[in-house]
Image (spheres, rainbow, N blue to C red):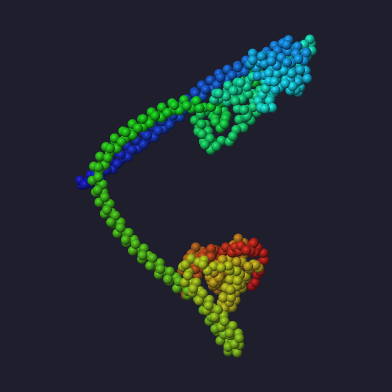
């Protein structure tokens, strides 16, 4: 039976699901509205940009048609002037008589009537005898194209010549003939530069090219004499802000035809029906963007108003929901009470867990203490056995009246006592991470020292030991005492493994490549369980002969040195232990001294 205080708990999930459903509906509607607004703005921008761009292009084509008509009209009007002046009796008479006092005044008067740029009268030697610009009097034009062509032809000749000061000179020239002989040349320059000045007042950049594609008229002075591709390249590098603005313009407009001073422009061309000339105009997208942005601003404003209305409706609903939340506060207080009880129960569990952790830590300490005592016993067995052997030998030597040799045995016993002290010091720091007492150690010397330590056990049995060592030092960074302990443990295990072998044989191979590797191989029965080999307290020896800690301790020591200890069974029988350690990098040596020389001893 449902208790009355449980009814709010049953109804709460239903109300929560409804609120969550409504929130998702609002979010989906908001996302759809935002996507619709973006799509409408994007489509409007693309459509209006295309439409206004086409309108701008048509206007530009009409403007170019007007400009090209003006140029053609000016050229046609100027082309008639040389023919009229070539028949002027006054000019013919001055050339025949050589009297030019009033000739320049006559040319100045004609210039005012026809609005030409300049008029010059040349004699048959190409010397200027009269001109509207008196500074040119006496100037020789014997090699000028318009003089040479006019002397060769009886018709009016048009020539476009590049000025030394920049720009192009558009000249009509004609030979003056009197009674069948050429007496001079009249040169009339068309004033096309005034069109350049009038074009500069508009926003477009305009250029006129000849039949070779060279620019002869342009609103950009540095374009003159270049091809259009060269002119578009010859512009200053845009700044970072200019590149950002250009990228924005490229996104908002259609792909531009070219860039003018870092600004995207549309290119419009028209043909001038005169000697293959063409007129090219570059119009910016500023006017297009202004009109498009005005429409987009209205659209965005409309969407903003709709969005504001939606937020108003949502705020009204939020106030209604707030009232509902207040009614649910009683249920929340009951829930808080239940949560308080659960928190108290959790705190009790955490206290019990803390007690269990302390107990586990104490158990770990006791286990470590047991391992340490076993390790001390294991590591001191070898020196004690050696001392017993040396004492027996010293007693025998004293009985044979050989005290000097007995003193040598006592000295070895003293060395073993020192070694036992070092072992106890090392075992006390076994649980601490090594590295503070490391020094460069010659691996060969450590092997020799370990064999000397094992000499009593080796003499007690007939075992063939083969050592293969490099001729040059093999230096590793380690603690010499602990490294010898590892080697001694490997030799002892090999001796134990070959007890039942008729001809025991132990190979010790030291190689040096990228790292130093000592391989200790025996011809015993091999290892039965490689997975448990380095686990503490695991041994194949009989009770009382071993604790199972030797290889575990050796593996830990080698890991402290930065190396590793591995084992595997040989293909032809026996076990192989490999002790791998990084070589000592001697910066002062200037190279690796371990690549040559191997010596062997049995």
> Among all residues in the image, which is located at the extreme front?
101
Residue 567 sits in quarter: bottom right
The spot of residue 402 in percent (x, y) is: 61, 88
User: Is 564 left or right of 295, judged from the image as shown?
Assistant: right
Q: Please state which of residues 178 and 154 is positioned toward the viewer in this rendering.
A: 178
Residue 404 sits in quarter: bottom right
Q: With respect to residue 439, does 12 lie above or below?
A: above
Q: Please state which of residues 525 and 89 is positioned toward the viewer in this rendering.
A: 89
Identify the residue shown where x is 38% and y is 65%: 361
Does residue 561 appear anywhere in the picture? yes
The spot of residue 283 in percent (x, y) is: 55, 25
Q: With respect to residue 586, does 376 lie above or below?
A: below
The spot of residue 506 in percent (x, y) is: 59, 70
Does residue 141 appear anywhere in the picture? no
Q: With respect to residue 592, does 369 lie above or below?
A: below
Identify the residue shown where x is 45% and y is 73%: 373
Identify the residue shown where x is 74% and y is 20%: 128
The spot of residue 401 in percent (x, y) is: 60, 89
Q: Please state which of residues 140 and 471 is positioned toward the viewer in this rendering.
A: 140
Q: With respect to residue 165, does 328 lie above or below?
A: below
User: Is 103 left or right of 349, judged from the image as shown?
Assistant: right
Identify the residue shown where x is 28% and y is 52%: 339
Q: Quadrant of the C terminus?
A: bottom right
């Amino acid at each position: 039976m449902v208790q009355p205080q449980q009814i709010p708990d049953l109804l709460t999930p239903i109300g929560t699901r409804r609120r969550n459903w409504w929130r998702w509906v609002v979010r989906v509607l908001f996302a759809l509205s935002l996507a619709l607004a973006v799509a409408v703005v994007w489509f409007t921008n693309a459509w209006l940009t295309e439409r206004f761009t086409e309108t701008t292009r048509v206007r530009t084509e009409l403007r170019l048609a007007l400009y090209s008509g003006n140029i053609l009209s000016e050229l046609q009007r100027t082309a008639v002037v040389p023919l009229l002046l070539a028949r002027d009796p006054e000019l013919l008479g001055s050339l025949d008589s050589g009297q030019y006092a009033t000739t320049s005044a006559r040319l100045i008067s004609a210039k005012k009537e026809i609005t030409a740029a300049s008029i010059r009268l040349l004699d048959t030697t190409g010397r200027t005898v009269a001109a509207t610009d008196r500074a040119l009097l006496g100037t020789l034009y014997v090699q000028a194209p318009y003089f040479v062509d006019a002397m060769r032809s009886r018709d009016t000749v048009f020539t476009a010549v590049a000025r030394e000061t920049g720009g192009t000179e558009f000249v009509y020239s004609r030979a003056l003939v009197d009674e069948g002989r050429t007496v001079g040349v009249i040169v009339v320059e068309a004033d096309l530069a005034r069109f350049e000045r009038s074009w500069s007042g508009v926003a477009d950049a305009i250029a006129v090219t000849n039949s070779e594609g060279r620019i002869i008229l342009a609103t950009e002075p540095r374009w003159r004499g270049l091809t259009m591709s060269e002119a578009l390249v010859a512009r200053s590098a845009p700044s970072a802000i200019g590149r950002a603005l250009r990228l924005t313009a490229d996104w908002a407009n259609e792909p531009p035809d070219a860039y003018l001073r870092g600004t995207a422009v549309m290119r419009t061309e028209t043909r001038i029906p005169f000697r293959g000339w063409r007129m090219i105009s570059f119009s910016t997208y500023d006017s297009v963007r202004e009109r498009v942005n005005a429409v987009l601003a209205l659209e965005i404003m409309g969407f903003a108003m709709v969005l504001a209305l939606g937020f108003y409706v949502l705020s009204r609903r939020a106030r209604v929901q707030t009232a509902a939340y207040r009614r649910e506060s009683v249920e929340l207080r009951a829930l808080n009470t239940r949560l308080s009880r659960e928190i108290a129960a959790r705190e009790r569990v955490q206290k019990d867990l803390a007690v269990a952790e302390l107990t586990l830590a104490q158990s770990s300490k006791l286990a470590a203490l047991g391992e340490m005592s076993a390790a001390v016993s294991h590591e001191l067995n070898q020196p004690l056995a050696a001392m017993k052997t040396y004492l027996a030998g010293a007693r025998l030597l004293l009985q044979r009246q050989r005290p000097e040799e007995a003193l040598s045995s006592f000295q070895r016993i003293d060395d073993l006592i020192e070694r036992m002290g070092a072992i106890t010091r090392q075992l006390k720091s076994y649980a601490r991470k090594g590295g503070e007492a490391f020094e460069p150690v010659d691996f060969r010397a450590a092997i020799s020292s370990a064999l000397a330590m094992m000499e009593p056990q080796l003499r007690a049995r007939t075992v063939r030991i083969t050592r293969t060592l490099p001729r040059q030092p093999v230096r590793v960074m380690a603690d010499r005492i602990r490294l010898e302990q590892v080697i001694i443990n490997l030799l002892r295990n090999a001796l134990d493994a070959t007890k039942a072998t008729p001809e025991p044989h132990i190979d010790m191979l030291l190689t040096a490549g990228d790292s130093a590797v000592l391989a200790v191989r025996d011809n015993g029965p091999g290892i039965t369980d490689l997975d448990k080999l380095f686990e503490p307290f695991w041994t194949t020896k009989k009770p009382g002969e071993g604790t199972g800690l030797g290889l575990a301790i050796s593996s830990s020591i080698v890991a402290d040195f930065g190396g590793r200890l591995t084992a595997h069974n040989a293909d032809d029988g026996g076990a192989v232990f490999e002790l791998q350690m990084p070589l000592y990098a001697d910066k002062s040596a200037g190279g690796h001294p371990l690549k040559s020389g191997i010596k062997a001893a049995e």
